[in-house]
Structure formats: structure tokens, C-alpha cells
Amino acid sequence: MLFSSTKSDWFGNVRRDLIAGLVVALALIPEAIAFSILAGVDPRVGLYASFCIAVIISFVGGRPGMISAATGAMALLIVSLVRSHGLDYLLAVTVLTGIFQVIAGYLKLGNMMSFISQSVMTGFVNALAILIFLAQLPELQNVSYYVYAMTLLGLGIIYLFPLIPKVGKVIPSPLICILVLTLISQLLGFDIRTVGNMGELPDSLPFFVIPDFPLNMESLMIILPYAVALTLVGLLESLMTASIVDELTDTKSDKNRECKGQGIANIITGFFGGMAGCAMIGQSVINVKSGGRGRLSTLSAGIFLMLMIVFLSDFLKIIPMAALVAVMIMVSIGTFNWNSIKSINKYPLSTNIVMITTVGVVVWTHNLAYGVLIGVILSALFFANKISHFLLVTSDVDEKNNCRTYVVKGQVFFNSAERFIDMFNFKEAIENVVIDVSQAHFWDISAVSALDKVIIKFRREGTTVEILGLNKASQTIVDRFGVANDPKAVEKLMGGH
């Protein structure tokens, strides 16, 4: 059931889930505002989206402890829509995106994650870590030395505070970093950039609104391409993040339920004035590293976020951005898979190419979907090339019966079909040929076509051919697509020669 969950998901880690939710809420505020500005909308749109999505996904999501909210990847996709058609079209596309994601969940597209290799996953993670770090650089440019000092102090607190006996393991160091740096900046009167400088904070809870959107085909065709793009990027980032959190926590999640949950969250968010969102790798890592494991951490992050921006906005406005930059740098360092660099000489060349290409494309385009798509394609090509080499054809001759027996071992498919044909001697003066394929598998129509060509070429030399040992699956595809016994099809297959 979509809403079913265990008691441990909610109450198995209450104290740490609540503290982690508070830390995440603090980190969500400047990012939600920044993503709103990036998308060209009022900061309220990103903040309302982060609140709604986090609260809703805590109940309907498939990955406990994962944080979903407004994200940069989604904001980048809607800039042109907002610029040309305004907020109401954005809200409409958010609802449509949610509908598509729910459909994807029922179609079990979450299972497609099995096609993403470890090298693509590593590249995805490393690219995100780099993007998270690069996103902090504007806050460190053309600033006073106070900002650099505060950022370094924040990093020192984050990494050294956990070493303090007892207390260091109880209170998350990012929270201490935020509190200490805020106190220092206020006591010393530093003139540095704060959360309040990022934009106006809302002073009320989100309310239900129906987008002023004309329900006609023309309007639908305007938002449809955006909805498809948002659906793909949102699900891709959410499912990849879920897999990463699975590894961090050594637990499993329901990817198809996550698709449905993301969809439900976006549908509701669109009716409460928020932009489309998805899972956030940075905040999810913050949550996990702060001790968050259950659904309560995600729910509390959303609730704390809204409570703070509505009732504690005066305090939030004075939090120095340097403190949040330090937290996000910690996230980028913790997110990056450093072992992938240490072990680069041990990995196969193809693995390194896939990982580095994925990183390069994501960082260059700032689009997660492009990088992962290229990585998956490269992985498939390298895999096909590798498997094609696992093909061997041996033979021996029975001179008494003037018969040669070929034994085929391995996989025959589009990338190995030509090699399969080349392994036979069609010019040998022999009456009978037996092809034993009991240790082989024919995967596609290219493989069937190759087998047809082998049979036809032998027959044209006056040799009789017998095929032995086709397994059930291979026999099925050969029976369906094979043409060796159809004269007209044979002539067409061999090019009319």
C-alpha cells in the first residue's frame, strides 16, 4: 500500500530524526530561496514547495530518511516557461509533472534503476559533489576576509566538534556550526551576507490555489514538453538519490513507491503555490550524516522549515551565509566518492571512461539527466563489446562420413553476429555440417540473421546443414524470425545475389 509504513519508520529514531530535521530545515532555506530566484519566481514559491513536498513525501515516499524539496535541477528546466508565460503555467506544469510521475510509478519504471551501472552511479555522485561545491563559490567571491575566516571556522567546528567525548556524538556538528557562527557575527558586528539578503521570507502558511490556466489544447502543448522533462529529471534524481541513501544506511527502498510519492507531492504542491521538486542529494546526505533515518526526519524538516520562516524569520535572517556555505562544503566533501580516485588505476579503462564522462557531462551542462544518459549509453556499449568477445567456435571433422561438426560457445547478438559468421569455413569441400549450439544463446534478430546466413552459405556450396541444441528461448526467436527455409526471404537477406 502506498501509505503503509512500519512503526520503526516513524518512531525508531525519534531524537536523532528531530535534530536532523532541524539541521536540514536550516540548510533548505537559502537553497529554496536561491532556486526560486534561479527559476525567476518569488522566494515564497520555492519555500512553499520545499515545505509541501517534504511533508507529503514523508508519508507517501518509498525511501525513509530521504529529503525532497525544490531543487536546482528542476528550477533550471522551468526558467523559460516562467519568463514567457508566468507563475500560473508553472503551477500547472507542476501538477502535470506529478500526474506523469504517478503513472510512471504504476508502470513500475522505478525498476529501470537496475540498468544504471555502478560507474554511472559513482560519476553521478561525484558530479553532484562538484556542483554542490561550485554552487558555494559565488558566496566566496568579492567578499571580506571575515567571510573566509568564518567559513574556515565553520568547517573546523563541523569536523572537530564530533571528536569531543559524549557531546560530539549527540549534537550534530552542522547545527553547532550555524549557531556559533551566527552568535559570533552578531557579537562582533560583522558586515557579511546573511540569509536575509537572499530575498523576502513568507509570513504565512501556504494556501490552496487553483492555477489560472486555460484548459485547452494550445496551453497543454505549451506545458507538455516541460512536464515531460521535469518528470524524467525529477524521477532520475530521486531514484539515484534513493539508491545512494540505500547504500549509506545499508537498507532497501521501494523505487516504484517513490515514483508515486514524488508524483503525489508535486500534484499537491502545484495547488499550494509551489514549484516542482524532487529528492535532494545534498540535504539527504546532511540528514543521514546528522543521524536522520526515519520518515520523522523528513516530516520534521518540512515542519521546522515552515515554522522557522513564518515565526522565526527575524532570527533566520541573521544567520550568516558563511555558516551554510561551510555546511554545504562538508556535504560536497562527504558526497564525493574519494575511493574512486584512489582506485582509478585498479579499475578497468571502460569503467573509468564511463565515470569521468558522466562527471564531465553533468558538470559541463549542469543537467543530471544528460550525464546519466550518456553514462548509461557508454556502459551499454562497453558491455556489448565485452560480451561479444565471449564467443568461441571450434570444430572437428569426421572424414569417414565427410562431416564437420562446429561447436558454438557464448553469446550471439548484434555486436558478435559478424564474428560468428566469420568463424565458419564455407569453401571447404565437405558434404555435411553439424552446428552444435547447445552452449550458445541467440539474443536478437541480428543473431538469427547471422545463423540464417551461415546455413544459406553452406547450402549454396552444396553442403547439408543440421542445427543441434538450440535452447528454448533461442528456438523461439529462431522459429519466429528465421528465414533459411523461405526462398524469397533468403534472396532478400543475401542481397539478391
Image (cartoon, rainbow, N blue to C red):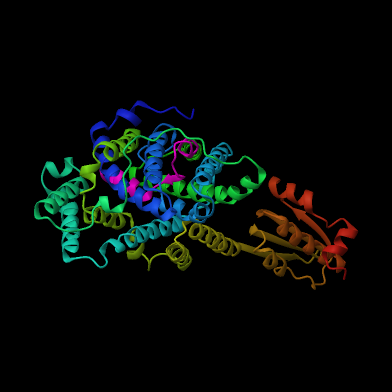
- Answer left or right for 484 relative to 305: right
Point 23% across, 39% down: residue: 312
Q: Please tell me how many numbered marks the rendered image carries.
A: 0
Of 78 and 228, nearer the camera is 78
Of 91 and 232, nearer the camera is 91
Q: Does the magenta stretch include residue 275?
A: yes
The relative height of residue 365 versus residue 295 in the rendered view (above or below) is: below
Q: Which of the 4 quarters of the picture holds residue 15?
A: top left
Instruction: Give residue 202's position: percent from left, percent from top.
Output: 33, 41
Q: List the single residue furthest toward the bottom.
A: 427
The relative height of residue 407 versus residue 169 in the rendered view (above or below) is: below
Point 59% across, 61% down: residue: 384
- Answer left or right for 73 relative to 173: right
Instruction: Give residue 334's position: percent from left, percent from top.
Output: 29, 54
Q: Does the magenta stretch include residue 189?
A: no
Q: Which of the 4 quarters of the picture holds residue 67?
A: top left
Instruction: Give residue 353's position: percent from left, percent from top.
Output: 46, 67
Q: List the single residue furthest toward the right.
A: 487
Point 69% across, 46% down: residue: 473
Point 41% across, 31% down: residue: 59
Quarter holding the C terminus? bottom right
Instruction: Give residue 188's position: percent from left, percent from top.
Output: 9, 55
Res. 401 visible in picture: no
Of 76 and 81, nearer the camera is 81
- Answer left or right for 13 relative to 216: left
In the image, the segment drawn in magenta is 266-291
Res. 62 visible in picture: yes
